[in-house]
């Protein structure tokens, strides 16, 4: 199918669904809705920057894990893993769609105290009940499997080599957008600057270019800027941009096997990244930042990250940083988990926000859930109701202890 050229002006004045934000959550939702046989309406995706250079999706570390404490997060991650492993089939079997490269070297959560060890053991039981292959390893077992670790101060670890690690999210993102457009989804490079609300329904959106577009449903998939979209609709959203830092480095002494994505008790994480290694962490003072603030904290690596790397993996005593960047979490300040589904009063306003670092791996489940709510009025694959906006209104946090 010939794709229409992406411009700044919409082709029509009315759409059944307008999705605000075209990064991974918006595009996953657009594709899933366009592929749903029960939906035959029109879809417009409004994205302010079609290069996606500054969005959270562009700054992701492309990781996927099942090591959560809440069953719903585990189920969404398992759904995402199945989506990645069967990507061509999920998108309709087009032979042009490539396989997605994956590296399942697993996550390794390290417990430095008995309290944390107990939490890992409890989480492993929940994960195993849902089919995950997570195993608890003693410090000695960790040392045998990965001799490069220093485990002198480790009680135990939690590890899973099945469907955990990192994958080529760029390919997934590209083909979700492409297939959505082949299905008739229209993308424009523009910005929503106002939303008209009449009573308990949204009726139209105004674009930065001046057009007013009538709508049936609005999906908020605006990443860290989601609070602005919510405000235009007369609602509140506890989401803000928080900085997260990534460092890619080379080691003078390469490890003899892959380094799992290791979550150190200090909160610093590290993993293999092809021929190099990657590490990351939040800042010590974790506050909201401006949407365009991607400046690095130049002392963070020397003062916080490198000492942890050298302690946990002594071979990392001598390393060289080759690249670094700061990205933004769309951070849910209530409970650090996604807010998904319709507003409790404005039923044609759908949230897909506040992923707090989990958006990429949860995007297949979220996209399908958003599509099901719009097409069927209910969730049919995974019940995402516990992540609904109602919990924000009631101040009843969704409990998840395994937050990175």
Image (cartoon, rainbow, N blue to C red):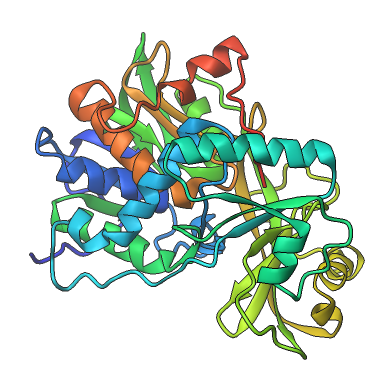
Query: Which is nearer the eye, 376 or 400?
Result: 400
Q: Position of residue 97 (x, y in %)?
A: 21, 69
Q: Would residue 105 be visible to someone looking at this image?
A: yes
Residue 132: x %, y % from top left: 46, 46
The reply, left or right, for residue 42 in relation to residue 105 is left
Residue at (51%, 20%) from the top-left corner? 235
Q: Quadrant of residue 200?
A: top left
Residue at 86% in and 80% down: 317
- On screen, residue 5 versus residue 64, left or right, reads left
Image point (13%, 36%), residue name:
41
Decide: is 25 above or below 137.
above
Residue 210, how many percent across, how many down? 35, 42
* Residue 348 vs residue 314, the one in the foreground: 314
Name the side, left or right, on which 181 lies relative to 195: left
The N terminus lies in which quarter of the figure? bottom left
Among the 4 quarters of the image, the one containing residue 140 = bottom right
Of the pair 345 and 47, the residue shown nearer to us = 345
Relative image position of residue 31 (x, y in whole percent): 24, 49
207 vs 96: above or below: above
Residue 211 visible to an observer of this rendering: no
Above-or-below relation of 247 to 74: below
Say left or right for 355 vs 251: left
- Numbered circles on residues, count: 0
Give the residue furthest to the bottom: 252
């Amino acid at each position: 199918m010939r794709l229409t050229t992406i411009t700044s002006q919409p082709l029509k004045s009315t759409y059944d669904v307008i999705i605000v934000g075209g990064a991974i959550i918006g595009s996953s939702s657009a594709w899933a809705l366009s592929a749903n046989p029960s939906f035959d309406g029109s879809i417009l995706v409004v994205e302010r920057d079609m290069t996606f250079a500054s969005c959270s999706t562009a700054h992701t570390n492309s990781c996927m894990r099942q090591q959560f404490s809440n069953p719903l997060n585990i189920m969404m991650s398992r759904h995402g893993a199945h989506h990645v492993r069967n990507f061509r089939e999920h998108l309709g079997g087009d032979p042009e769609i490539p396989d997605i490269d994956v590296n399942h070297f697993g996550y390794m959560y390290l417990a430095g105290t008995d309290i944390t060890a107990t939490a890992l053991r409890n989480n492993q039981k929940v994960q195993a009940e849902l089919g995950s292959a997570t195993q608890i390893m003693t410090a000695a077992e960790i040392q045998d499997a990965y001799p490069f670790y220093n485990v002198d101060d480790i009680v135990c670890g939690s590890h899973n080599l099945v469907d955990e690690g990192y994958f080529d999210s760029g390919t997934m993102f590209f083909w979700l957008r492409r297939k959505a457009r082949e299905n008739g989804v229209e993308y424009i490079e523009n910005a929503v600057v106002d939303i008209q609300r009449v009573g308990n329904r949204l009726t139209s959106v105004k674009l930065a270019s001046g057009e007013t577009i009538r709508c049936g449903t609005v999906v908020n998939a605006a990443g860290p800027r989601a609070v602005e979209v919510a405000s235009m609709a007369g609602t509140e959203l506890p989401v803000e941009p928080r900085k997260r830092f990534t460092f890619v480095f080379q080691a003078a002494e390469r490890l003899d096997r892959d380094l799992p994505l290791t979550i150190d008790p200090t909160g610093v994480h590290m993993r293999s990244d092809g021929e190099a290694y990657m590490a990351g962490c939040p800042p010590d003072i974790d506050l909201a930042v401006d949407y365009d603030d991607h400046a690095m904290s130049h002392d963070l690596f020397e003062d916080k990250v490198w000492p942890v790397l050298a302690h946990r993996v002594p071979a990392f005593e001598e390393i060289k940083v080759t690249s670094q960047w700061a990205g933004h979490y769309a951070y849910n300040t209530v409970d650090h988990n996604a807010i998904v589904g319709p507003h409790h009063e404005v039923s044609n306003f759908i949230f897909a926000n506040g992923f707090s670092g989990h958006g990429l791996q949860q995007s297949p489940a979220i996209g399908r859930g958003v599509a099901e709510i719009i097409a069927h009025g209910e969730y049919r694959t995974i019940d995402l109701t516990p992540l609904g906006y109602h919990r924000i209104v009631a101040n009843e946090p969704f409990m998840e202890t395994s937050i990175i």
